[in-house]
Amino acid sequence: MDLILILGSGAAGKMTVGQELMKITDFRLFHNHMMIEPVLEVFGSFQGALISRLRDDIFDEFLKTEYRGLIFTYMMAFDMPSEWEFIGNLSAKFEATGGTVYYVELVADQQERLKRNRSDNRLAHKASKRDLDLSDSRLRYEDTHYRLVSNDGEVPFENYIKIDNTTLTPEECAHKIKAYFHLPDKCINELARRVRLAEVPESEISDLYEMQVRSFMPLYEKYHDAGSPAIEPVDRVRRRFAVENRKYYFIMLDGARVGAINIGHNDPEEKKTAFISPLFVLPEYQNRGIGYTAIQKAFEKLPAVTCWKLETILQEPANCHLYEKCGFVRVGEEKPVNDRMTLVDYERIIK
């Protein structure tokens, strides 16, 4: 497993850059204050030994997961041997798995860091910084009493970059790191870990119906098609739910219901052909790869199926692209619904 270690002075932007880096890679973020703040909340004071133990537990448990890697942020005093020892031991944990450690040092002038010390994002994640005058004073003290910026040529690591991000946005800095280390793009595997399909119980059909209406209403308002799922009665959903060989599943993202999919066989004797109808994702969760992931999960539910079928709107290129990305191809004739909308059939054949 790989590790991206982001070092820098107080308010250099370590956490914020880490947040942006997590958006564009398959690395998770563990910023140092995730352990510091809960301990301060409970004990009312800094408990270094406890924070270190908790931090080590997080590292050890994370190394057991299937994630690509971890982003860890840390304010390192380069003039303290114990800090080098900590960094060395941490790196060894990840390298022992065959992973690579990438070292990033962020540098920004004090005036800019004092501005960042009062940013909404920083204060939202670090309660101990909310006494602004005290926090500013602590930042100046740390700058004076510790050497928080490395000397030229001091850092011996092979995969190392030092970035002056005084004038860079967090997004620009994250992309610079990604490009320098040739980190791969975010892939579907991360989302696959977060998305699952949960069978819809009969008692929650009303919730399912409400989600369906919300999801399809924008398309209905655009095309005004009489067969839209946005205007079908709830009884039709109940009848579809009752079909013996078909099942509804909620699409769950991190434990929240964000859509639904209905899959199965129309003919109880035909187990090699399955249909997807309907599939929907709530508007606020669309264009995140959730639909693609849900379809992959649907394939896993019915591994014996060799032919998958569905229907979509020709005038919706994003939908057509989604299904083609999943291996579907257009078949049959176009089916005009009205002067604005045409339905087309798609099939995916598994050989």
Image (cartoon, helix red, strand yellow):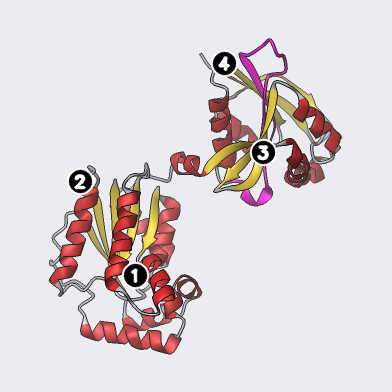
Left or right: residue 253 compared with residue 131: right
Q: Nearer the viewer, residue 176 or 237?
A: 237
Label 2 CA crowd tier, 10 Å (few <14, some 14–19, many 20+): few
- The numbered disc on residue 260 is 3
Q: Are marks 2 and 1 in contact (CB under 8 Å)?
A: no
Residue 70 in the image: state x and y as whole percent: 34, 53
| Of the image marks 3 and 2, the number of the one nearer the N terminus | 2
User: Which amino acid, by three-letter code, is at mark 2?
Assistant: Ala
Q: Amino acid at mark 3?
A: Ala
Residues at discs 2 and 4 in contact (Cβ within 8 Å) = no
**Residue located beneath label 4 in the image:** 306
Q: Which residue is mark 2?
A: 96
Indicate which disc, 4 or 3, sits on the residue closer to the N terminus. Answer: 3
The spot of residue 322 in percent (x, y) is 59, 35
Q: Nearer the viewer, mark 4 or mark 3?
A: 3
- Camera-side mark, 2 or 4: 2
